[in-house]
Image: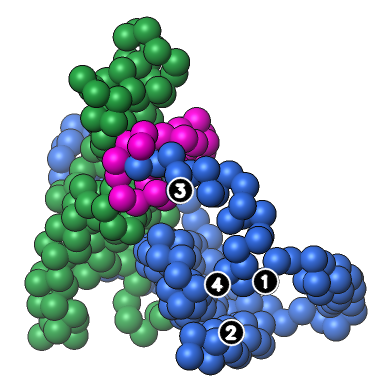
Amino acid sequence: MNPHIILRVVGKFLIPLIATFALYVQFHGEVGAGGGFQAGVIFASAVILYALLFGLDAAKRAVPPSWVRIGMTLGVLFYGGTGVVTWLLGENYLSYDILGPVAYKGQHYGIIAVELGVLFAVASVMIGIYYAFGSRQPDLDDEDW
Amino acid sequence: MTFILDVIFLAMLVVVAISIVRLRSLFAIVMLQGVYSLISAAWFVSLDAVDVAFTEAAVGAGVSTVLMLSAMLLADRRSAPVPASRQLAPLFVVVIVGIVMLWAVPDLPAYASPDSPVNTGVGADYIDTTWKDAKIPNIVTVVLASYRGYDTFGEVVVVFSAGLGVLLLLGLNGNAGRWRATPTGRQLYPKAAPSARVSARTQPETGSGRTKATALETRRTRVIGGGS
């Protein structure tokens, strides 16, 4: 009998909720508290909770390390790319007004794009740092703590 | 009412901070740091700084606690006691800094004062222009993503380079058991890091004899040498 059975059952129930909450924070950030950074950290904590409860190998099969590398790069490129797009459209770097038919719509689109970049970068980096530290040693037995 | 809450939260922060200083068990210290962040988050809510509280709860109490725990896998479980002679210089620095900060307190504006620089300068401009420019209710989001888009881009690049640095130094998959540590005579290293088992499973051609041997080990290797 696994001593972590209660943690795992509760975790299986909670992890999808945490990931969904991260998306809520992401896409509701312009109305309520939070934004891309908080959403990225919350999503990363869902993956890290999975890694803590079911082991690093299982987490690496669910979220492969290559996604982490791609995700953190994509995030920065997405943010910077939004600036380049506004640049190419003839505005200043990261001036979102040009992105929409009306200036405030452009602000909406620009902020959503930029926050997506933040989400990808932060979530991938947090997961990546956990993978990097956690992969150095095998999982400890309980009495070792 | 909120004043009483603030005092209670600050008193709890002081208690937690003192116990962190006095503890030697790193596991308990990491847990108490999470408690400290959580109390700070509650305090920020009582100060009406919801965005800051949210970040503190997610980053301080959540992820950084876990990252500290995973870093503890590579370190010892207890910190060595510091002799009193080496505590004098830090004590001196802390006393000086504390005096300087207390000295600056009378110059701070009162809490929520409408005459404070925050509420009269650029902050008031943001409150006026945000709705006209972006029609987004959360002013913090607009300030971070639009008015200060360069700053936030810089922060994302900082986060990215932090991740890049860790990945370059430690590697995303560990080092397949090549790295070893024996803090205070206790051998913590296994025959191979868990990532070696993953790579041996997914890429059989790269598995040397050693990684194949560890792939067969289903039970976790636990080596404790000497008496600690």
Q: Earlier in the sequence, mark 3 or mark 4?
A: 4
Which residue is identified by label 2?
Answer: B10
Which is nearer the eye, A99 or B166?
Answer: A99
Q: Chain of mark 3?
A: B
Foreground: disc 4 or disc 1: 1
Which residue is identified by label 4?
Answer: B76
Q: Earlier in the sequence, mark 2 or mark 1?
A: 2
**Circles 3 and 1 in contact, beta carbons < 8 Å:** no
Label 2 to label 3: alpha-carbon separation: 30 Å
- The magenta region covers B132-160
Which amino acid lies under the numbered mark 1 shown in the image of this protein? Ala
Label 4 to label 1: alpha-carbon separation: 45 Å
Which residue is identified by label 3?
Answer: B127
Numbered label attached to residue B156? none
Q: Earlier in the sequence, mark 4 or mark 2?
A: 2
Foreground: disc 3 or disc 4: 3
Label 4 to label 2: alpha-carbon separation: 31 Å
Q: Is residue B57 left or right of residue B77?
A: left
Chain letter for blue, please: B
Location of residue B227 by image quarter: bottom right
The image quadrant where one finds the N terminus of chain A is bottom left
Which amino acid lies under the numbered mark 3 shown in the image of this protein? Ile
Q: Earlier in the sequence, mark 2 or mark 3?
A: 2
Instruction: Count residues near mark 3 (Cα–Cα under 10 Å), then give few for <14, some for 14-19, many for 20+.
Output: some
Image height check: is A85 above or below B12? above
Q: Quick one: SS at disc 4?
A: loop
**Circles 3 and 4 in contact, beta carbons < 8 Å:** no
Label 2 to label 1: alpha-carbon separation: 17 Å
Residue A2 visible in the shown view: no
Which residue is identified by label 1?
Answer: B110
Q: Quick one: SS at disc 1?
A: loop
Q: Chain of mark 1?
A: B
